[in-house]
Every structure is written in structure tokens, then in C-alpha cells.
Image (cartoon, rainbow, N blue to C red):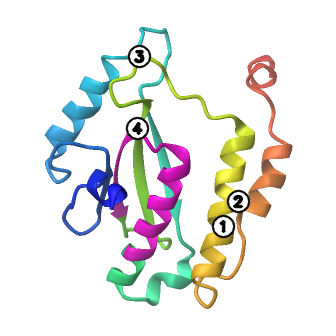
Amino acid sequence: SQDRAQECAGKPGVFSRNLMVDPNDLGAVEQAFEANARFLRPRQGGNWCYHEIIALPKTVKEKDKGAIEAMLFELAARYVKGRAPRQLVWGQVHWETKHPHLHLVVSANEVRSPRRVRLAKARFTQIIEELEVFKCARWPEVLPEKLWQYRKRYNQHRRSHSEDHLT
């Protein structure tokens, strides 16, 4: 499939999308992100990549590592399809905490584009909510509860950047 052609096969624990380098070669991955960032128009304080995390609850820790990794990769593939379909993405699974999780690095621009991709908060929330619905339907016995609903309440009480600055 086209999605599979865009993903590079990495060693266990490594996820990548739209990278044309070996995802196991961290130096090459870093160079690919930096080369893609050079296409961006210079902007003071402008991001050229984002760090995002997909985490599973600690209750899945007893499962087989391969099964957990497959869950994280399936969630990441769906997330990236909605969040960054034409951007560089690289990630690695981490096991050192109670919650197995996947760290993702996402380029701020599409491959070789001079413009940053802006994702509205409403669209980001929609992507997360759709991922939660998928997660609960796909693994109802393992991941039955929705966690984003609690996060939404947290987001409603957050201050804006200007309010934080005044404080």
C-alpha cells in the first residue's frame, strides 16, 4: 500500500514516516530533519519540529512487548495520517516508565515545503478524539476507557500565553 511505501522498516521500537533514510541511523535521521527545515522561511522563534508522545496506560505493561509495540505503531500510523500525512516523522518506543510510550518527532513543514503546517486546536482535538474512539473499538478489553475527556477539562482551565506572561 501507499502508506506502507512511505514508512521505512526500522529495528524494533522505531517508527518512521516519509523519511528517505535509514530510520535506525540517528545521524541520517537528524540530517534529514535539518535538511527539510532549511526549506522553511526564517522566522524568529519558529519551530522546525515538534515532540509528541503517544502513551498507553500502565495496565498494558503486563502484555507482550511485541503486542504493545504493535498497538503503539498502529495508533501512531492513524495519528500521523490525520496530524502530519506529508511531514517527516520519526519515533522510538520507551519502556523505562510505568506507561509504555512512543516519542514522535514531527517536522513543522511538509517535505521540502517553505511553509509551516498549522493545525488548529479544534482539528487537533478532533484527531485525538477520533484516535480515542478507534483505540476503544480496536482493543476494548485492553484499552476500554477514554482518557482525552479528562484532558479537555484541563485545557479549558489553561491560561493563554499572554495571561501567563502577565502573571
What is the crowding at mark 4: few (fewer than 14 residues within 10 Å), some, or many (at least 20)?
many
Mark 4 or 2, nearer chain start:
4
Q: Classify mark 4: helix, strand or loop.
A: strand
Query: Vertical placement of 19 versus 33: above or below?
Result: below
Graded by Cα atoms within 10 Å as few (under 14), some (14 to 19) or many (20 or more), the crowding at tag 3 reads some
Q: Which residue is mark 2?
A: 129
> Is residue 109 found left or right of 130 in the rendered image?
left
Is residue 167 rendered to the left or right of residue 52? right
Q: Are marks 4 and 2 in contact (CB under 8 Å)?
A: no
Q: Could you tell which of marks 3 and 4 lies nearer the N-terminus?
A: 4
Crowd band around label 2 with a 10 angstrom C-alpha radius: few (<14), some (14–19), many (20+): some
Q: Residues within 10 Å of mark 1 (few under 14, many from 20)?
A: many
Q: Amino acid at mark 1?
A: Glu
User: Which residue: 74% across, 19% down?
Assistant: 165
Question: What residue type is disc 3 on?
Answer: Pro
Q: Quadrant of residue 130?
A: bottom right
Q: Which residue is mark 3?
A: 114
| Residue indicated by mark 4 | 87
Which of pointers 4 and 1 lies earlier in the amino acid sequence? 4
Q: Residue at x 65, y 56 (%)?
A: 128
Residue 158, image x, y percentages = 80, 39
Spot occupied by residue 22 in the image (x, y as percentages of width and height): 15, 49
Measured in 3D between alpha carbons, the distance from the residue under mark 3 to the one under mark 1, in whole angstroms, is: 32 Å
Frontmost residue, 151 versus 98: 151
Q: CA distance from mark 4 to mark 2?
A: 21 Å
